[in-house]
Image: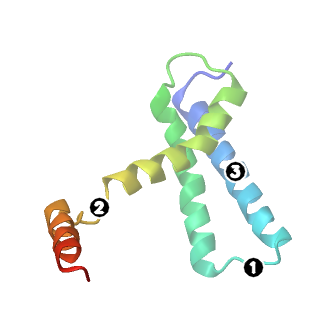
Amino acid sequence: MVVGFWATLGLGLLGGVIAELIRIAGLLRQGQRPGALELLGSVIYAALGAGAVLFGWTTPHSAFEVAVLGAAFPALFASAVGSAGAKPKPQPLAFDAWARFRSWVTGS
């Protein structure tokens, strides 16, 4: 059981590092070489794995659970940021309906 800020932070970081190593290994197996920016992003994502400490360092957790949270936290963070981003402006439905009606009436 893991209890404490630094132990939880370390195991979360380890989980993030393992997840990024698996991702980079998959790229290498496909014959793609990650660039410098992609490697920098991997370092940042691995560091975000330390965010597992936010789920509670005062209550005992198993080491596996903390490592899995560390691996999942970057994906959760990226999804939250992506969903909060700018969304494309939807096209007004009335204009589309009017254009369809006009083409139906004119036969064009």
Amino acid beneath label 2: Lys
Q: Nearer the viewer, residue 1 or 42?
A: 42
- Residue 42, horizontal then vertical, whole percent: 61, 63
The residue that appears at 23% across and 72% down in the rendered structure is 104
Q: Nearer the viewer, residue 1 or 35?
A: 35
Which element type, helix, strand or loop, lies under badge 1? loop
The residue that appears at 68% across and 57% down in the rendered structure is 20
First of labels 2, 3 by sequence position: 3
Amino acid beneath label 1: Arg
**Relative to 60, does residue 14 appear above or below in the rendering?**
below
Amino acid beneath label 3: Ala
- Residue 82, horizontal then vertical, whole percent: 40, 56
The residue that appears at 49% across and 44% down in the rendered structure is 76
Q: Nearer the viewer, residue 10 or 66?
A: 66
The residue that appears at 74% across and 65% down in the rendered structure is 24
Label 2, label 1: how far apart the Cα atoms are: 32 Å
Determine which quarter of the picture holds residue 93: bottom left
Q: Which residue lies under the disc numbered 1?
A: 33
Which element type, helix, strand or loop, lies under badge 2? loop
- Residue 77, horizontal then vertical, whole percent: 46, 48
First of labels 3, 1 by sequence position: 3
Which element type, helix, strand or loop, lies under badge 3? helix
Circle number at residue 87: 2
**Relative to 56, does residue 17 appear above or below in the rendering?**
below
**Callout 3: 10 Å neighbours few (<14), some, many (20+)?**
many
Q: Is 3 left, or right, of 108 in this rendering?
A: right
Label 3, label 1: how far apart the Cα atoms are: 17 Å
Q: Which residue lies under the disc numbered 3?
A: 19
**Callout 1: 10 Å neighbours few (<14), some, many (20+)?**
few
User: Is disc 3 in contact with disc 1, using a CB cutoff of under 8 Å?
Assistant: no
- Residue 65, horizontal then vertical, whole percent: 66, 27
